[in-house]
Image (cartoon, coloured by chain):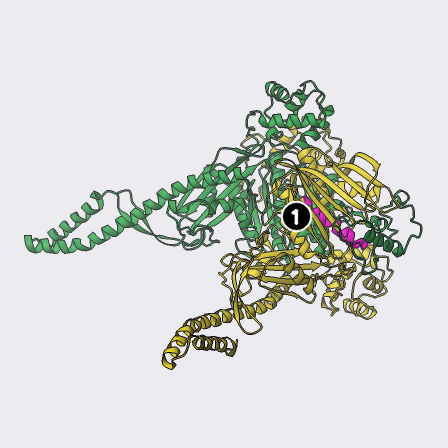
Chain colours: A green, B yellow
Amino acid sequence: MTSPKDPATPTLFEEAAPDKAKASPSKPKAAKDGASASEGEGAGGKEPGGKEPSRRSSAEEMATRQREISVAEFFTKNRHLLGFDSPLKGLLTAVKEAVDNSLDACEEAGILPEILVELHPISEERFRIVVEDNGPGIVKDQIGKVFGKLLYGSKFHKLSQTRGQQGIGISAAVMYGQLTTGKPARIVSRTGKKARAYELLLAVDTVRNKPELHAEREIEWEKEHGTRVEIEMEARYQKGLRSVDMYIKLTAIANPHVQLTYVDPGGVKVVYERGTKALPKETVEIKPHPHGVELGRLIQMAKETQSRTLSGFLQEEFSRVGPKVAQDICKLAKVSDKAHPARIAREEAAALHDAIQKSKIMAPSTDCISPIGEELILAGLKKELEADFYTSVTRPPAVYRGNPFQIEVGIAFGKPGGVGLELTEEGRIQKVKKEVPATEDLVGNADEPVRVLRFANRVPLLHQQSACAVTKAVIHTNWRAYGLQHPKGALPLGAMAVLVHIASVWVPFTSESKEAIANYEEIQKEIRLGLQECGRRLGTYIRKGKRLRAEFDKRSYIEKYIPHIGIALQEILDLSDPDRDGTVKTLDDVLQKSRKF
Amino acid sequence: MTSPKDPATPTLFEEAAPDKAKASPSKPKAAKDGASASEGEGAGGKEPGGKEPSRRSSAEEMATRQREISVAEFFTKNRHLLGFDSPLKGLLTAVKEAVDNSLDACEEAGILPEILVELHPISEERFRIVVEDNGPGIVKDQIGKVFGKLLYGSKFHKLSQTRGQQGIGISAAVMYGQLTTGKPARIVSRTGKKARAYELLLAVDTVRNKPELHAEREIEWEKEHGTRVEIEMEARYQKGLRSVDMYIKLTAIANPHVQLTYVDPGGVKVVYERGTKALPKETVEIKPHPHGVELGRLIQMAKETQSRTLSGFLQEEFSRVGPKVAQDICKLAKVSDKAHPARIAREEAAALHDAIQKSKIMAPSTDCISPIGEELILAGLKKELEADFYTSVTRPPAVYRGNPFQIEVGIAFGKPGGVGLELTEEGRIQKVKKEVPATEDLVGNADEPVRVLRFANRVPLLHQQSACAVTKAVIHTNWRAYGLQHPKGALPLGAMAVLVHIASVWVPFTSESKEAIANYEEIQKEIRLGLQECGRRLGTYIRKGKRLRAEFDKRSYIEKYIPHIGIALQEILDLSDPDRDGTVKTLDDVLQKSRKF
């Protein structure tokens, strides 16, 4: 037990407990307290008992044990909340957090990203992960905080589409490394040709949630600018649908502007070349939309604003509020639009909040969102997934709780490998042998549930599939209408991969580990609309395939009899063998050409 | 966009960027940076393009935007993580957090708890919740921090069985209230007869994660000691399995020493009288067990210890390490047991950690756990649930990751209402009419999935049932063996409630909102063993019931013919009517008594 003299939280005993003199073993006092409880009240009419002598603590003793908990301690003890529940998942989470940061930094700086990811096995249960980028680098005195302090970053306070948003991820990875191996992380960073490169060894001081610097020096680095992170951690490596390999592959699909080099624990190097040299459209930071703001937040914003009038405040701090709208809101709320924002009372603020909800305000602008685009999704799917049929849809932007978002859906359908049918230009149907892809099969088999590939702000989500709004939308779409088998309440069956991407200024994840998207109605609806549009195209394709199959069967049937017809004609008309063969040929041509498909 | 002159994070530009002079619109520099990227490297052999002119940010500009994020801001934006995702759930979460705190405080002080919970509707979508206890009270200068600062508390740093463990819950409720209504919470507290009662109006300063005091004064309060919390919030009230009503009822079952008074929004008052006057056994705080400690944590503990020798350190800071074990560990690790803990190198610490894992160390002591107990579980079930059959099991304590825990299971079986069969003392089987309970039916119908009542440290868990280790254990137990229908991969069917309680010094929840228990193998196994034991008893009961039913049917069948036998005998033997009736009576008696059940 903590001693009552814990210096961490000095308390003013005098006020609350005048009889506090016998400091340490104040058991008797506690007993008295307890006893008084058993006599005093009895609101329910029943006398609370005192069978056993009350021992235990008084309010004063308890006060001495109250302490602040550092957020780093909190997440060390609750590290499963951040995706570090197991060595297997920890490896993926660490890589993901580092790559997310690299990509965000490159794009923010306007640099076409080149990322290197390496997994070095130290032992069966220990790996060193390396993630290196050609980003803008980090200025030296920020490195410590970026990698060694939880809840520190530039993305939390603004509304814009970034991969990271919390300022927790990479520091948590560093913390997990030090927790499991005792070793600090190694960071190398350089901000430009004329700047020096620095190497830092650092860890998180969990008690204080501050970076703990182990070493720092200037080094020579061949890169002109960029950042390299090395973390040693307890981890396990495994191939499959939730592996680092898969994460890298999916990242390449959703980020065609990135060049990704991946070295797996066996030393095998895979390079994903970029498919486009165009960086994603630069996204604009937006102000909150009035319809998404709660009363408490409104009051706080009014307190903090620089504006001197309510009208100015509404126009300055929110998007889509012009002088006219601001005036209308104030009128409706019966508050002067000249009032000083910081001085409006709670009641006026409540009226204002009410008026905002009732006012018609234009939907937020959507240039803050940068979708992948239908073409690039199609290109990505074609590049990395073997299939027969591809389609993609980018939905128009929509809004949930004042936050703009945009949904994209892609489908790759058709069993890789086996034999397929193809219609030639002359109208012939021919069999084609399909190659079995050497890589991980992302499309799956015809009798298996379809594969759902989920992305949020271009980041693949590999865990917690069943808790995700995307999965729910796929399950609740009627795939039977599009020619697939679809057991009730489950994923449809088919050799198919469904890609869904949500881009938003604030993706509502169900946990800090950012593995699943919360089930907002507006998001659900948009995903479903995207799925339906792709589904209809898929349906057309599948029906066409079925007709092709039916026609092929019919033709095969007729084909079988044509030679016999030839022989019969030969006998009846007394044809020569060449004449007979010629007739058969003609009949065959007629069959293939005249029967329209 | 944040101005680059943001004073929050001053940076040393000199070192990292010697050419930084043109402070504000350094766009040209960014462009240069981007361009140099397009020339410089090209590790993959491909020239990274520069199609569009790089505009965007440099490392220096980005540095100015880095900021610390307060944990209160973080959880305001991510409040679904704490259980405040909707007005419906928010109401329950707030009540739960307040009651948890009240019960913990009462028990810590050795006071038999009397709790009052009131829900006052302000409008359809706004409620004032009131939770009042007769606990030890809170000393005045701690009140602010307890209710107005996240990650502050006495329970996080110790290993002991408490309901709260994070120091987040009640402050989050206050924060949710202020966010949705703009109003501060009202706290009244008094620490004893001789102390004064204080009333505070307070909120959370989210930017700084500090209490924001709106008002404070001394008041007259009829209670000698205790705390009252009032929070006004946006909320919705609904009856049902996940309602506040249900939470209160389940709390009464798992806490038979508590007197609970509940006033629902309609003003209806329900009093749950306590079933025992014995407080739960006082739990002891324990030290961490060596087998559950990671390397990084070991290193940190060695740094912080007061002990001067390694041997002393191991004995002082861990449970179950005596001089002999400490010596053995040091020997195995090839480190002197006289070494100064703070000065051992990382490699030695690693060897020590290794040696600890390899050493046989006694399992942690388990007096730190206070289960409800088989009798009280049974009493609780009988008091609140109408059923035909009850049983309960308290498993012996076990350990996961060095943390002791204990599982308890209770079962209430049998459809409430309808007609049942009963065996009288004379061996007669008689029909009994069962009353339909007026309250919420917790046992359910025979063709429905069984109801799972989950508890962690005596707190009912109402949400995220499917993600919980308890539900998984119920699903994976073979209930067919005990006479229930059991669809594969789903809950068994039956008019039955299954209660599972986990008591532990650290309950591994899957999220901060503490709604589901993480699926540790050791926990899973213990729950299953408890379920099986109860299941076997249930099986015996169900089989007996089936035999009773079969016997009843057989007797009914014979009974039907007895009068006819009487008439036949009368005709053959020429009996008088009374003789015939006497014979029928005798035959009936023989039937009922001679056929043994």
Count of numbered circles on the image? 1
Instruction: Write the residue at 46% across / 48% down.
Output: A497
Residue A577 is left or right of residue B56, and the answer is: left
Quadrant containing the N terminus of chain A in the rendered view: bottom right
Residue span colored magenta: B94-113
Helix, strand or loop status at disc 1: loop
- Whether residue A52 is visible to the viewer of this picture, yes or no, is yes
- x, y percentage for residue B534? 60, 66
Please name whichever residue, B232 or B90, is drawn nearer the observer in this view of the structure.
B232
**Marked residue chain, label 1:** B
Q: Main secondary structure of the magenta part?
A: helix
Q: Residue at x 59, y 30 (%)?
A: A291
Reading the image, the residue beneath label 1 is B513
Seen from this angle, which residue lies furthest bottom? Answer: B573
- The reply to whether residue A216 is visible in this rendering is no
Amino acid tagged 1:
Ser
Q: Is residue A508 magenta?
A: no
Tell me which residue sits at (63%, 62%) in the image.
Answer: B410
Corner quadrant of residue B229: top right
